[in-house]
Amino acid sequence: MGKDILVTGFDDSDIAMRLKPMLTTVRTNVDEMGYRSVCVAYEMIRTGKTSSISLEARLIVRESCGSAPEEKVIAKHLRQIAIERDAIQIVNAIFQKYIGDVENLKKVKFIQMIYGLMQDEFDDIFRGRPLDIEQYTKKIQMIFRETDSIYISLLILKKILLYAKEIAISLCGRGTPVHLSIEEVYNIFFDHLLDYSVRQEGIQHTNLVYSNFLISNINKDMMINSYDEDKSFFSIVNNLYHVNFKSSFIYTFPVPVIHYQYEKWNVPDQLFLKAYHINENLKMVEPPEQQVSIYYCIHNFHMPKNRRFTFVLVPLFSNEEQYGLFVCELDLQYFSQIYSVILQICTAIRLTRLIREMEGDLEEARYDNYKLEEISASDELTGVYNRRGFYRYANTLLERPESLNQIGILLLADLDNLKVINDTFGHDEGDHALKTCIDYLKASTPKLDCIGRIGGDEFAAFAILHAEEEVTEIYRSIKEAAKAYNLTSNKPYHITISIGIHTFVCTPGKKLQSYVKAADEILYEDKNKKNRVVIKSQQTNTPT
C-alpha cells in the first residue's frame, strides 16, 4: 500500500459537509493560490521561465474517508480531555466527529453561539454544577433569535447535539442532579431546533417558489419589451436582483456570431453591456457607454470597486448562434439557478430576435404591398391615378366628415386631336401630349385635390371648393396654361384640351361616379368649341 497521497484539487466547499457521507477534502488558502498563480503567469510571460511554489494545505478528514478515527479511539481521546477538564477541546472533538474541521464554521455567528453554549455547559459539568435552566433557556432563545445562517445541515447539527448530550451525561453520571438538568436543557434545545427547521423549510419553499416565478418571468418580460432591446435586458437584471444574485451583467455581441462545432472560434473585439445590477443598484446602460472590450468584461468601471468579488461567466447561445456573455455573482448554494436563468435568457433573446425579424419582414411586406397598391392605382405614363385609383381616392375625399355639405366638382377633360398627333408625328409625341395635359390640370387655380387618367385621352379631377365662383377660375386657368404652352412650345403641333365641370353639394352615400353623366354633357359642349387645326404654320407658328 502506498504511503503518499497525491492531491489534485482543493475543494473544501460547504457542499462537502452536505454530502452523504460527508466528503473528506483538502483545504488551502485559495486567495493566496490565485495570487501566486498570477505571479507565476506574469513571470512566465516576462522571462519565459517559471518557478515552483509550495502553499500550505491541510487534509480535512470526514466520514467518506476510510481512515477516519474509530469510535473507540474517539472515546479514548474524549476521556483524556475529560481528565484535563478542557471544555474547548471537548467541544472541538464533538464537532470534528461529524464535520472533520470547524475553522470555517466558527466565522458564523450561529455556530459561535452554540460553541459558547457548549463550553459553558462542560465548564459547569466539570465543576459538578447543575445547569441553570433559566439562563440556558435565555441563551438558547437568543441563539435562534439571532440566527444569521447555518453552513451545516440541521440533521448534522442534531447529530452533534445528541453526541454532546451523550458525552455530557457520561461525564456527570446518570441519575445525578446535573444529569437531569442536562436532559432538560437539551429538550429545550431540540424543541427550538425543531421549530427552526419547520420555519426554515417553509422559508426555503417560499423562496424557491418565488425564485422560480421570477426566473420564469424573464422570458415573459423580454417578450413584452421586445420592441426595445435595452429595456428587455434591464427587465432581466431587475428579476435577478430579487433571486439571490448579488450582481449580474449582460453583454451582447454587436451581432450574433455563428459558430459551428470543430470550427475555430473568432473572438469578437467588442461587447455591449446592456444592463447590470450590483446589490440594489440596477442600471440600464445607455448606448454611448455600452461598448466594452471583450478583454475587460470582468474588469471595467461598472464593476464593484469597494470589495472583493468572484464572478461566474457563462456564454449566451442558442444552437450555433452566440449572443454574448452573462457574468454573475451569487453564493454557492444558489448555483443551481444559473442553468435556469441562462436557459430563460437565451430562449428570450432568440424569441425576441425572431419577433423583430418577423416584424421587419411584415414591415417590408407592408411597404411592398403599399408600392404594389400604388402601382396598381397609378397610370404608368402620366404618373397620376388610373381610373380605379382615381375613383377610389376621390370617393375617400368625398366621404370625409369635413366634406359634408361642401361644394364639390367633378372635372372631365379630353386631349383634343390625339389621333392626328399620333398618326402625323408618332406615338412618342402622342405620349408627350398626354403628359402635357396633366401639366395643364396641375396648373389650375385653385388646385385640384385629385387628378386621374381614366381612359386613352380622357382625364378626370375632383376638388372641394369654397365658392361656386371658383369653377370659372379653374376652367380659365387650365385654358390659359394650354395657350401659354402652345405660344412658347417648339413642337410643330398644338396641344389643347376640352373641359367639362359639374358642381354639386357633397352628400353622404353619393359616389363621384353618379355625377359623370352631368359632367360629360358639359364636356361635350366644350369639345364642340375645340381647335380643329392641329399642325402649326411653319412661317408664323399659327394654325393653318
Image (cartoon, grey):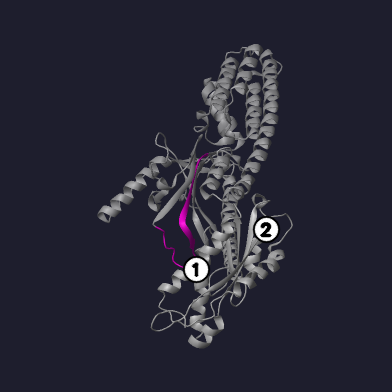
Residue at image point 56% right, 77% down: 416
Q: Dot 1, how many residues are within 10 Å of its Cα: few (below 14), some (14-19), or many (20+)?
A: some
Q: Dot 2, how many residues are within 10 Å of its Cα: few (below 14), some (14-19), or many (20+)?
A: some
Q: Magenta includes 319? A: no
Q: Position of residue 210 (x, y in %)?
A: 65, 38
Residue at image point 73% right, 59% down: 510
Label of residue 504 in the image:
2
Above or below 101: residue 535:
below
Q: Position of residue 205 (x, y in %)?
A: 68, 37
Q: Position of residue 444 (x, y in %)?
A: 52, 62
Which of the two residues, 134 or 213, is positioned nearer the viewer here? 213
Which residue lies under the disc numbered 1?
439
Q: Magenta includes 255? A: yes
Q: How many marks?
A: 2
Residue at image point 40% right, 53% down: 294
Assign a secondary structure to mark 2. Answer: strand
Which of the two residues, 364 or 350, is positioned nearer the viewer here? 364
Above or below 200: residue 61:
below
Of tags 1 and 2, the one toward the viewer is: 2
Above or below 414: residue 118:
above
Query: Which residues, given as a range, are shown in magenta?
Result: 246-268
Q: Which of marks 2 and 1 precedes in the sequence?
A: 1
Location of residue 520 by image quarter: bottom right
